[in-house]
């Protein structure tokens, strides 16, 4: 999984795969209606399966936080 | 009643032959008489069956409540949880049972972690090298 590869690449990154049906309170919290839905540092959301350059682009927005 | 059928077992054994180094599957679950974790027993069984298919895979099982200190060390906050640890702990976690499509992600990740190389592009590596603060990525999926 791309997010897990990113976790391998950087000491700063941790990545979870979360099975939404087993954690409905989290699925609600992050407004997961369709999957996959990627949440980065709580507030950056990416809908669908993002290709590598797109996910990295979203991830780098943490520098603006 | 095994979780994996013979056909899947054969495919998994073959996929795991691509592993380079050892990988530990650290599972956090709850003891079998606890009712609060619906998929805990099945997740543990699945991980143990997969680990049996390669000499390079080992399993460690921890009880989420009894082994609170270990859960804290791995920053595991919910169960069932699997931490994939290769030469080091890269911060790779699976929460919930990795079945269906997630199962192939688990297989891919095991092999990738065993090689200790992310396989990402040079551009990606250069970008993430600029990070200097924690980044927590959660990918919500369903197994259906």
Image (cartoon, rainbow, N blue to C red):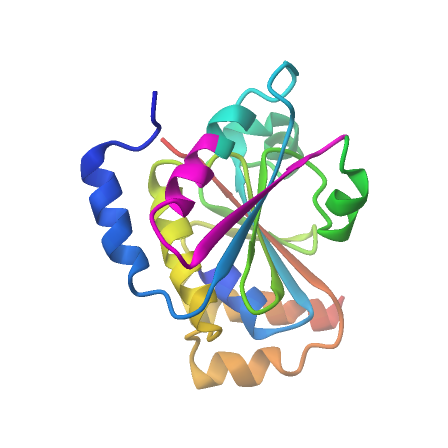
Instruction: Examine the rendering and report whether any part of residue A12 can be seen.
Output: yes
Q: How many marks?
A: 0
Q: Residue at x 55, y 20 (%)?
A: B38
Relative height, residue B33 to residue A40 (above, below): above
> Which of these two is toward me, A34 or B1?
B1
Q: Residue at x 18, y 38 (%)?
A: B7
Viewed as shown, does residue A12 lie left or right of B117? Answer: right
Quadrant occupied by the N terminus of chain B = top left
**Image quarter for residue A32?**
top right
Q: Residue at x 72, y 40 (%)?
A: B77
Instruction: Examine the rendering and report whether any part of residue B98 can be seen.
Output: no
Q: Residue at x 73, y 49 (%)?
A: B75
Viewed as shown, does residue A65 lie left or right of B22? Answer: right
> Which of these two is toward me, B117 or A18?
B117
Inspect the magenta stretch and tell me whether residue A23 lies in it: no
What span is colored magenta in the figure? B45-65
Viewed as shown, does residue A20 lie left or right of B102? Answer: right
Relative height, residue B104 to residue B44 (above, below): below
Inspect the magenta stretch and tell me whether residue B52 lies in it: yes
Q: Position of residue B13 (x, y in %)?
A: 27, 51
> Which of these two is toward me, B127 or B80?
B80
Q: Position of residue B81 (x, y in %)?
A: 59, 40
Q: Residue furthest front?
A: B55
Q: Residue furthest left?
A: B7
Q: Position of residue A21 (x, y in %)?
A: 51, 27
Quadrant occupied by the C terminus of chain B = top left
Q: Position of residue B5 (x, y in %)?
A: 24, 31
């Amino acid at each position: 999984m791309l997010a897990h590869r990113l976790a391998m690449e950087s000491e700063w990154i941790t990545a979870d795969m979360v099975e939404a049906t087993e954690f409905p309170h989290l699925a609600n919290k992050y407004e997961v209606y369709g999957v996959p839905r990627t949440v980065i540092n709580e507030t950056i959301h990416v809908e669908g399966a993002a290709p590598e350059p797109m996910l990295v682009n979203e991830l780098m927005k943490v520098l603006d936080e | 009643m095994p979780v994996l059928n013979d056909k899947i077992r054969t495919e998994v054994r073959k996929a795991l032959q691509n592993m380079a180094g050892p990988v530990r599957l650290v599972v956090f679950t709850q003891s079998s008489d606890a009712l609060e974790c619906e998929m805990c027993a099945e997740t543990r069984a699945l991980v143990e069956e997969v680990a049996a298919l390669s000499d390079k895979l080992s399993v460690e099982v921890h009880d989420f409540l009894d082994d609170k200190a270990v859960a804290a060390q791995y920053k595991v906050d919910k169960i069932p949880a699997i931490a994939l640890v290769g030469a080091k702990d890269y911060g790779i976690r699976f929460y919930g049972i990795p079945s269906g499509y997630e199962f192939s992600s688990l297989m891919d990740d095991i092999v990738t972690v065993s090689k200790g190389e992310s396989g990402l592009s040079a551009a990606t590596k250069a970008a993430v090298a600029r990070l200097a603060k924690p980044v927590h990525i959660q990918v919500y999926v369903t197994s259906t």
